[in-house]
Structures are given as C-alpha cells and as structure tokens.
Image (cartoon, rainbow, N blue to C red):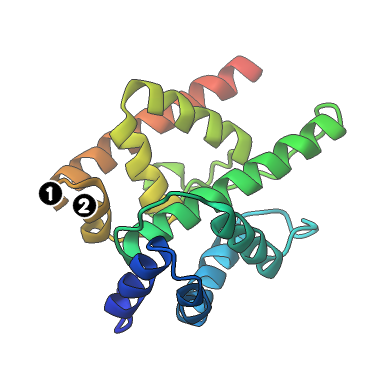
C-alpha cells in the first residue's frame, strides 16, 4: 500500500488534524484512488445485485471521515486503517438492515480473504464475520484490530506493525493465530445454525 505520496499524505493529514480545512481538499485527490480500490475490493465480496456500489461506499466513507472530530492522524497507514474500519461498519450496518428488513432472508456469503487459506471455498456472511471479530476483540483486541487492518484495510505486515506499534514478527504470529481462531469460531457458528 506504500506509495511515493506517503509523506505528502501524512503531512496533509496532520495539517487537517490541526484544523487546516484546505488540507482536506488537497488530500482527497491523493487518497481517492486507493480508497476506491479498497471499496472495490470490499464490494467484490458482495453479491452482484448489491445496491451499494464502490463509488457510493467511498463517498459514504468520505462523509464519515469529514464528520470525525478530534482525531489525530498519525500517518497514511492510520488513515487507511480508519477508512477500512468505516467501510466495514457501513457494509455491516447495510447487511444488518437488509437482514432485519427481510426477516432473516438469505445473505450473500463472502470469503474471509484469499490470504486466509483455511477459508478456501467456505463462505461466511459479513455479519457473521463482524460478530466473530467483535468476539475476538473482547478476547484479544490487538488480534482483532490486526485482522481488520490486514483483511479489511489491505495493509501490509509492515504497515500493520506500524499502526499497532508492534514488530512485524508479532503481526505475523497474531495473523496465524487469528486465522485459526476465526476459522474455529465461524465453523462453530455454522454448526450451531445447522
């Protein structure tokens, strides 16, 4: 996810945090393509007839970012981590509203991640994944945050380590443990539903 504009993005984020509203106008063109790529990645996991499109997801994230108050941006990786978290929340909220609206209607199943080899062909809906990550967060907040950064945010091992203030080896170790834990948790939930 690193790019030549990392320093410029970090500088503009800090200026925006410092109250310089014009910094946001300069920041948007630098991050829009990456936000759109991230949104497209999210939407590729959704059903084809999903009414929310990548561009709409980016615009919703932008609106929520603008509304964030008192957030002190650390760097580019932090910005994309927060953006990924917002995208996750938007999609989960959307899925939950659709679920309740249809009174338990069928959900589109999504793969956890191509990097999560243990989920090869199994599909889990975004609500089940969110619930499992919330449970993991109560048990081990760092591992849940790491999954969110790696899977939803698309951050590299190094960028994730930077955001979490841990070593890359710790991220790799947490990633392996979290994948196993999530597989077990989602499998148990599936068995409970059957």
Is residue 176 at all visible to an observer of this figure?
yes
Q: Nearer the viewer, residue 109 or 22?
A: 22
Residue 80 figure quarter: bottom left
Left or right of 135 on screen, residue 103:
right
Residue corresponding to mark 2: 161
Residue at position x 59%, y 54% in the image: 67
For the C terminus, the image quarter is top right
Counting from the top left corner in percent of width and height, residue 165 is at: 18, 47
Q: Nearer the viewer, residue 73 or 111?
A: 73
Secondary structure beneath label 1: loop
**Rendered view: 159 above or below 26:** above
Place of residue 34 in the rendered image (x, y in percent of width and height, measured from the top left): 48, 73
**In this view, which residue lies farthest toward the top?**
192
| Residue bearing mark 1 | 167
Taking the spot 75% from the left edge, 60% from the top edge, the residue there is 48
Q: Residues within 10 Å of mark 2 (few under 14, many from 20)?
A: many
Mark before the other along the chain sequence, 1 or 2: 2
Whether residue 17 is situated above or below residue 139 in the rendered picture: below
**Can you say which quadrant of the picture contains the N terminus?**
bottom left
Q: Residue at x 46, y 32 (%)?
A: 133
The image shows residue 3, relative to residue 124, as above or below, that is: below
Q: Secondary structure at mark 2?
A: helix
Position of residue 23 measured from the top left corner of the image (x, y, whole percent): 45, 75
User: Would you place residue 132 above or below residue 63 in this image?
Assistant: above
User: Looking at the rendered structure, which numbered label has been put on residue 129?
Assistant: none
For the point 63% across and 60% down, the residue is 63
Nearer-the-camera pick, 22 or 74: 22
Determine contact: label 1, label 2, CB under 8 Å.
Answer: yes
Give how far apart the Cα atoms at labels 1 and 2 are: 5 Å
Residue 157 at x, y percent in the picture: 24, 56
Is residue 154 at all visible to an observer of this figure?
Answer: no
């Amino acid at each position: 996810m690193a790019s030549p504009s990392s320093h410029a993005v970090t500088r503009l984020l800090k200026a925006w945090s410092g109250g310089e509203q014009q910094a946001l106008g300069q920041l948007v063109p630098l991050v829009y393509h990456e936000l759109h790529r991230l949104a497209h990645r999210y939407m590729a996991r959704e059903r084809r007839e999903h009414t929310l499109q990548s561009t709409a997801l980016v615009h919703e994230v932008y609106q929520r970012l603008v509304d964030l108050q008192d957030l002190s941006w650390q760097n580019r990786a932090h910005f994309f981590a927060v953006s990924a978290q917002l995208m996750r929340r938007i999609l989960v909220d959307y899925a939950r509203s659709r679920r309740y609206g249809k009174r338990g209607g069928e959900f589109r199943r999504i793969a956890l991640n191509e990097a999560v080899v243990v989920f090869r062909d199994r599909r889990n809906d975004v609500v089940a994944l969110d619930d499992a990550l919330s449970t993991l967060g109560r048990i081990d907040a760092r591992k849940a945050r790491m999954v969110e950064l790696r899977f939803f945010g698309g951050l590299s091992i190094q960028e994730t380590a930077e955001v979490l203030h841990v070593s890359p080896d710790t991220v790799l170790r947490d990633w392996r443990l979290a994948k196993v834990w999530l597989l077990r948790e989602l499998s148990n939930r599936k068995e409970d539903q059957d």
